[in-house]
Amino acid sequence: MNHKITPYKNLKESKKDQVSKMFDNIAENYDFLNHFLSLGIDIVWRKKAIKELTEVKPKKILDIATGTADLAIEAMSLKPKKIIGIDISEGMLKIGRDKIRTKNMSNIIELEYGDSEKISYDNNSFDAITAGFGVRNFENLSVGLSEIYRVLKKDGKFVVIEPSIPKNFFLKSLYNFYFKKILPLIGKLVSKDNSAYNYLPESVDNFPQGKKFIDELNKVGFKDSKFKYLNFGIVAIYTAKK
């Protein structure tokens, strides 16, 4: 895996700092672009991911790379006592906090500035951990996964949503055209960040998909690791237990 894929090629800052800056830059338009560019299907993906936690009945959930908190908000359907969302972008967290206040969920969901590769919670703190479209932004994947494993309780469940590349040649060609030509153009026009939506397809190409990501989960100690593709393979949901 190449961990050197970064949003801004001309900057010498770390990937982590660049990702933080990128999401600060696009925060105001992030939700609109997410829903628009996915034709609203991202909402369904989150529902399916949270449904994977129904059996666990988690009381305390950690949402990694929470962004504007859409996955944390969806997790409210599980009726937990507490949801903590962490992210390295204050711009995204501000949008998320406003959303949570509007929905009167501040008594359950708390958003904090936090690094997924250095989580500020004790071992075995959470019944479940979620991550929606954020794991591929880790600077060091194995460190981030090890931290997630550390703070997850025994028999707790980890659920990840990440984009993937379809295997079918025709679908892959369409996907690549949309993802690498259309999406960056729309993202650039709406977000005014020339790099963010070029980085997106690069980060997907660079991510260990399918069985390769399962191997990464198993390396740090997870068990019963599985994945399934949605919508002809353009997104995958991964699950694993401690």
Image: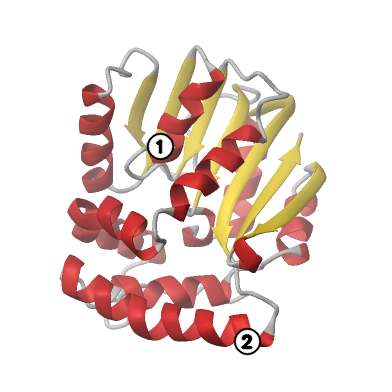
Is there any visible trace of residue 121 in the rendered image?
A: no
Res 214 → quadrant = bottom right
Q: Which residue bears the numbered disc 1? A: 86
Q: Point out the frontmost of discs 2 and 1.
A: 2
Q: Position of residue 98 (x, y in %)?
A: 20, 31
Q: Position of residue 221 (x, y in %)?
A: 79, 44
Toward the viewer: 198 or 123?
Answer: 198
Q: Position of residue 69 (x, y in %)?
A: 37, 37
Toward the viewer: 195 or 161?
Answer: 161
Is 128 above or below relative to 4?
above
Residue 178 relative to residue 121: left or right: left
Which residue shows up at 39% across the image and 39% down it? 70
Image quarter in which the C terminus is found: top right
Res 15 → quadrant = bottom left
Tell me which numbered mark, 2 or 1, is placed earlier along the sequence. 1
How far apart marks 2 and 1 lie (CA) works out to 38 Å
Count of numbered tags: 2
Q: Position of residue 10 (x, y in %)?
A: 27, 83
Toward the viewer: 181 or 9?
Answer: 181
Q: Which residue bears the numbered disc 2? A: 170
Res 56 → quadrant = top right
> Label 1: how many residues lie within 10 Å, few (<14), some (14-19) or many (20+)?
many
> Label 2: how many residues lie within 10 Å, few (<14), some (14-19) or many (20+)?
few
Which residue shows up at 29% across the image and 60% down it? 33
Residue type at numbered disc 2: Phe
